[in-house]
Image: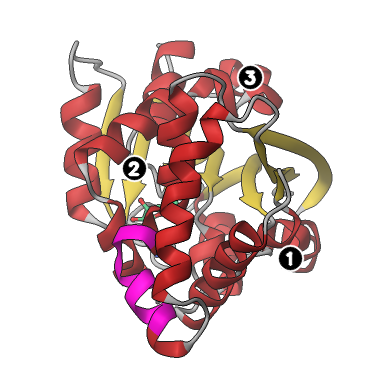
Amino acid sequence: MSNKSYAFRDSQKFNQYLIRNRTFDKCCGFIKELVKQSTSILDIGCWPGSVTVGFADANPSATVIGVDFNESQLEVARSYTQHPNRENLSFEQGSIHELPFEDNSFDLIFCQTVFVHISDHEKALSEIMRVLKPNGIFASREVMNSYIVMTPVSDILEKARRAIHIGVTVSGGAPDVGLFMGEKLHTAGFDHLNQSLFWERSPVGEESREHFINMCSALLYGELGKQSIKNGWITANEINELEKLCFKLPDIPYAMWGMPFVETIARKH
Ligand SMILES: C[S@@+](CC[C@H](N)C(=O)[O-])C[C@H]1O[C@@H](n2cnc3c(N)ncnc32)[C@H](O)[C@@H]1O
């Protein structure tokens, strides 16, 4: 299990960045109508709560629950979303491998960039299947680290991408899981499968500086950096170069970073 890998991402700044960028409007275009039609919605791996609160606001008559493995991540979600109080929204601690809910509880389950960090996908999907109501929908957004595009093309950025890929893999995750979600859902017995591809690109202007730093923060300032140097995935000098480049990129008018997300919708029959 890879929850230890979240230590590097608990800074206030990173939370604020995610809250601004991981929103219902930015991430959930593919399920907007489904959210409006649902009476019970679960967001798994919900930190920082910015998507979960979007569900509660988009459909005030639905019961919306955010669940996350990590209690400290839930504190971020609670403190950010409970002002003003929303009666239809709550957060609970729990694992995707053992969801703390009765069978047949939800019309819609959403899960974004969680399968990338876990290894037992089969168990997770059987839990999701169990707590979905018959005909309920599972919607996921997962990344494909191997297909990130970065311009200007740079050896340092490519090395950083590869070090992150290896780091996620050795900590038990699946950095390209977006590519396999459809197959996994089909194998788990879901039907009415629909997949689409969404490119999340770096913002423009001053926000992009924070973006580039945040995308590399695990390497620049976290345990992953130390682990990568120790294992020879990247050198300390290259990490210094990477930091300089991240600060410089926003001044390059054509700099761009694009992350492909696979958006999958599937039904429990
Ligand atoms: C990369 S973050 C994604 C957060 C949010 N869904 C988003 O897209 O912005 C992954 C989240 O999954 C949570 N997580 C990791 N393993 C989990 C597990 N086994 N069960 C539930 N949540 C888990 C982490 O605590 C973290 O909050």
Residue linked to disc 1: 184
Mark 3 vs mark 1: which is more N-terminal?
3
Quadrant in the picture for residue 198: top right
Residues at marks 1 and 2, CA–CA distance in whole angstroms: 24 Å
Residues at marks 3 and 1, CA–CA distance in whole angstroms: 24 Å
Residue 168 in the image: x percent, y percent?
A: 51, 71
Residue 112 in the image: x percent, y percent?
A: 53, 45
Residues at marks 3 and 2, CA–CA distance in whole angstroms: 20 Å
Residue linked to disc 2: 47
Respond yes or no on whether mark 3 lies under 8 Å from ligand 1.
Answer: no
Q: Nearer the viewer, residue 107 or 214?
A: 214
Question: With respect to residue 149, does 62 lie above or below?
Answer: above
Please say whether residue 216 is one of the residues in the magenta stretch: no
Please say whether residue 226 is one of the residues in the magenta stretch: yes
Residue 219 in the image: x percent, y percent?
A: 41, 63
Magenta residues, start to end: 220-229
Q: Which mark is residue 59?
A: none
Mark 1 vs mark 2: which is more N-terminal?
2
Question: With respect to residue 31, does 119 lie above or below?
Answer: below
